[in-house]
Image: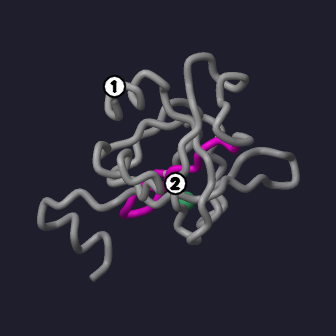
């Protein structure tokens, strides 16, 4: 069943999480359709995130991350800003890195507010 089909039955489809790509002018673009997404930069919601950490996975239905999104698809595509690892504080103060599985099956760190993680997992 397609993700669009699920939406018709009132089920929120999981957000598609992908690596942002950039065009020749270094503008972030959607990897699926090539649409420039720079204007959407900010906090994004990932519905049903595929979190690697078991305690986190049980705690989060929605994960807030920082990056871009493309709204030109029947499902939401979120493109988290790339961070180096668990330490995201250099990137946004008070945020931390959590591991999430992307649509390409690779696990990468994405930024999320540190307070949410400590509140959920203690
Ligand atoms: Zn797109």
- Residue at the outermost top position: 93
53 and 101: which is toward the camera: 53
80 and 93: which is toward the camera: 93
Magenta: predominant secondary structure element? loop
Mark sitting earlier along the chain (2/1): 2
**Residue drawn 33% across and 54% down?**
48
Numbered badge on residue 119: 1
Q: x and y percent of residue 63 in the render? A: 39, 41
Q: Which residue is under mark 2?
A: 100
**Mark 2: secondary structure:** strand
The crowding category of the residue bearing disc 2, from other C-alpha atoms within 10 Å (few below 14, some 14 to 19, many at least 20), is: many
> Based on the displayed image, in which of its 4 quarters is residue 98 positioned?
top right
Q: x and y percent of residue 111 in the render? A: 57, 36
**Residue drawn 40% across and 26% down?**
118
Check the image and tell me how it is coloured.
Answer: one colour
Relative horizontal placement of residue 40, taking residue 5 as reference (left or right) = right
Region rendered in magenta: 71-82
Question: Which quadrant is the N terminus positioned in?
Answer: bottom left
**Residue drawn 83% across and 46% down?**
26
Relative horizontal placement of residue 116, taking residue 111 as reference (left or right) = left
Q: x and y percent of residue 116 in the render? A: 39, 27
The crowding category of the residue bearing disc 1, from other C-alpha atoms within 10 Å (few below 14, some 14 to 19, many at least 20), is: few
71 and 117: which is toward the camera: 117
- Residue at the outermost right position: 24
**Residue drawn 65% across and 63% down?**
31
Numbered badge on residue 15: none
């Amino acid at each position: 069943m397609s993700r669009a089909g699920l939406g018709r039955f009132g089920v929120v489809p999981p957000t598609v999480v992908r690596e942002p790509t950039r065009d020749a002018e270094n503008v972030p673009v959607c990897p699926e359709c090539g649409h420039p997404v720079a204007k959407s930069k900010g906090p994004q919601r990932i519905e049903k995130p595929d979190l690697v950490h078991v305690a986190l996975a049980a705690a989060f239905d929605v994960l807030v991350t920082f990056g871009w999104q493309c709204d030109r698809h029947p499902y939401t595509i979120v493109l988290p800003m790339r961070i180096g690892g668990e330490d995201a504080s250099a990137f946004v103060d008070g945020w931390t890195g959590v591991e999430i599985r992307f649509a390409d099956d690779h696990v990468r760190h994405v930024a999320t507010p540190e307070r949410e993680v400590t509140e959920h997992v203690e």
